[in-house]
Image: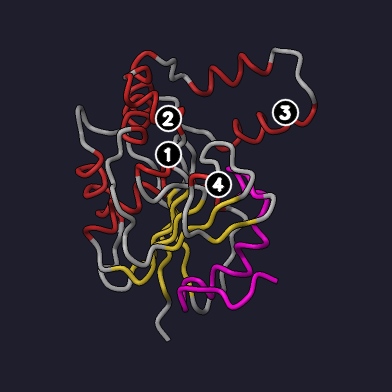
Amino acid sequence: MEVIKVYMMPGMAANPTVFERIELPEKEFKIIWLTWKIPKKEESLTDYAKRMTEEVTTREAVVLIGVSFGGVLVQEMSKYLNLKRLIIISSVKTKHELPKRMKFARDTGVYKVLPTGLLDYITHIEKLPLGDLIRKRLKLYQQYLSINDKEYLNWAIKEMLCWNQDKPIENIIHIHGDEDLVFPIKNIENSIVIPKGTHIMILVKYKWFNKHLPELISEGKISSQL
């Protein structure tokens, strides 16, 4: 039996170690982590996605899995590949699933003046008097954020907010947490809902993914979440 290659794309500014707890049966699957590249000057998301497909060595029966903005990117990549399965996690399928605050930022252009030094921003927040839970979450974010390049962040925020996908890609599988504060579940349609799943559930709900991803990849559905 031919081993299925599963390409995984992390979220905005994140490094692929967000997938370090994801394990699939080695006889059936080979996990390949994808890493963000610094965009070229004025490079469109479409052109960036086409460039990212150069990392995909298999042209037939490709499996793409993306988290958050990485989910948007793999959707764009899928337009240039022959896929077996397209799976997004904690992401959106169209521009219509973006929350109101993001649509406002897009429509007003306010995102153009937002500070984009994410790691510096988190370091600053850490100095404030915070509860233990919030502090632990900040540490978690900081551990997996690796790109603090201003050009990349400006580009990524713009492309996320201005993504113009109008209709979902056919047969896409969307996994979403009901406690996702970045992309609230109330705006999401046709997804597999994970109870108590947050925007970073790829880190904390890894047991669910390890159990169900093999079936989702092979069959395109899960027989039971129990």
Say which label, 1 or 3, has the lower sequence index.
Answer: 1
Numbered circle sitting on residue 102: 2
Side (left or right) of 215 relative to 224: left
Q: Magenta span covers which residues?
A: 197-226
Tag 4 secondary structure: helix
Return the residue nearer the eye: 221 or 85: 221
The residues bearing labels 4 and 1 have C-alpha atoms spaced at a distance of 10 Å
Q: Amino acid at mark 1?
A: Leu
Pointer 4 residue = 185
**Is 94 located above or below residue 212 in the figure?**
above
Quarter of the image with the N terminus in it: bottom left
The residues bearing labels 2 and 3 have C-alpha atoms spaced at a distance of 23 Å
Say which label, 2 or 3, has the lower sequence index.
Answer: 2
Tag 2 secondary structure: helix
Say which label, 4 or 1, has the lower sequence index.
Answer: 1
The residues bearing labels 4 and 3 have C-alpha atoms spaced at a distance of 21 Å
Q: Main secondary structure of the magenta part?
A: helix
Q: Are there few (<14), some (14-19), or many (20+) residues within 10 Å of tag 1? A: many
The residues bearing labels 4 and 2 have C-alpha atoms spaced at a distance of 15 Å
Image position, residue 179 (x, y; %): 64, 44
